[in-house]
Image: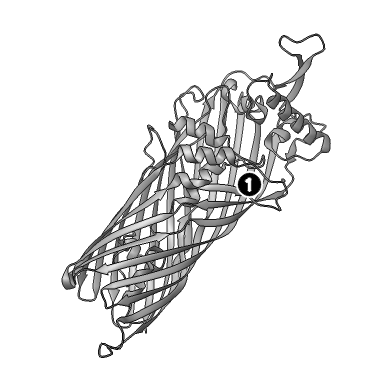
Amino acid sequence: MGLATLLGGFLGSSQVAHAQGNYADDALLYSRQAPAGTARTLGLGGANVALGGDFGNLTSNPAGLGFFTKSEITFTPGVGFGNANSTPVANAASLTGTGSLNQTANSFHVASAGIVFSNRRPDSDNSSDWRGGSFALGFTRLADFNQSFSYRNNTDDDHSFFQFLREPGGYGNYTTPAYQNAVQGIRAQDGAGTYTNLDGLAYGNFLTDFIKVRRPGGAVGDSIYRAATPLRTGTIQQNETVISKGSMSQFDLGYGASYRDKLYIGFGVGIVSLTRTRTTTFSEGSGGNEDFNYQDYLKTTGTGINARLGLIYRATDAFRIGASVQTPTYIALEDSYNTTLTSSYAPSSLSNVLSTTPGTYNYSVTTPFRANGGIAFLLNKYGFITGDVEYVDYGQTRFNTQSGDQNGGGDFTNTNEQISNGYRNVVNVRAGVEGRFDIFRARLGYARYANPYSGTSSVARTQNYFTGGLGLRTKSFFVDAAGVYLAYKDQYSPYTLASTFSPVVTTNFNRFTVSLTGGLIF
């Protein structure tokens, strides 16, 4: 399955008419996590599955908590600087001469915060082979939703948003029952004066009309509806800005223990908290004038849970091997939404601004099982080299309805099928090195998160993280700083057409994040 097919399927997969985004894209958004944790972990590219002795182990491999011999408290603030450069893809829906646009998205955040309580037996106490253990609790930011991009596109009327309106409900063939049912649903919105989607707003704003035509091959009087829009000729100018804000974070409880200082075992439970807002502003114009614009607002909040189990084996003083598994994460979600359409075509005697009735929609998502493996080589007092691999099957993400939503529940069958067919299992890799110079530390790291899409594409969807950091550690406190640079490409389409090509935009994203960890040892 190619990328163009995926875009077409994904963008047509919304289960509730209010959602101008799409759930298949959200499946990846909620499943694909970035390197996370303390500045030490971030400076190593997120590679810490086999290391131990860092608060970041709480979310990656809780067995690492068994390495603590003293208690500590940490706090990690951070700031991110993002940039996006967007260019329309040359196809039948994109004429030449549109160029590219830059957009920035900056944010301040807390990357992690927590406390570790350690209980270690004295070396002289040989009453048990269990040498010690540590209990930890804290907060970690797993995913960053702060993103913004803009583009400008030139197209013609046959590939414009008006063509989208001429395909009500996403159906291009006006002779089908599905098309006619969609028409009746739009007319019913106008009759009730309550609008729930863009199709309804367009009809209420006179951008769309439904004319009666004779059914092809039908008898006289056998009429059906066909959508029509105002006539436009020449080049159609499109402008859109998409702004996303928010993050996915996890509150963790975990315990790790040391058996003979050779085998370390740990377990943890995570409570996920998710907040994301997405504001889309789209407009079209012809003849130098703006014909209409709409603004779509979607806020998603959620709470979920997962659990993990980990092991680290210290084969020698210089070599460690670690592994951890995490259950699928179940997240209960709620969408709050509103769309406003302003039309220049509405008669002056009537309002040309209409909005959907604000509402909420309740559903859930289950993100995939994760498995991690890692190795670490300790270079005596001079530092270490470490590497991780992570297995994730993005095609296993599943959406489900929940009772109590105002829309009576949606059917996610098609969305889940598109996720299964459109995404694949991947192996992500992370690697890092630390050099020690007395109380000072220097770190470098790299992480590669593989392309999650099935099939072939001209756009590589791999995410590459380049990291580095510095640190200072004494017997009573430590300070670490890290920089993380992310670069990747993505594609986007504002709407999908059943009858022809839709506009497609390629965006080059990059983001640089700086984090600072302060810790007290007690």
- Work out whether residue 340 can be spotted: yes
Q: Where residue 106 sits in the image (x, y, percent)?
A: 47, 54
Task: Reply above or below: 495 against 47.
Answer: above
Residue type at tag 1:
Tyr
Task: Reply above or below: 53 against 190.
Answer: below
SS for dot 1: strand
Q: Which residue is drawn at 27% across and 68% down?
A: 313
Local crowd size for mark 1, using a 10 Å CA cut-off: few (<14), some (14–19), many (≥20): many
Q: Residue at x 17, y 70 (%)?
A: 382
What residue occupies the far bottom of the structure in this picture? 124
- Between 69 and 122, the residue placed more toward the observer is 122
Q: Where residue 44 sits in the image (x, y, percent)?
A: 30, 61
Label 1: which residue? 297
Task: Reply above or below: 44 against 16.
Answer: below
- Work out whether residue 54 can be spotted: no
Q: How many marks?
A: 1
Quadrant in which the C terminus is drawn: bottom left
Quadrant in which the N terminus is drawn: top left
Q: Residue at x 72, y 9 (%)?
A: 217
Q: Identify the colour scheme used.
A: one colour
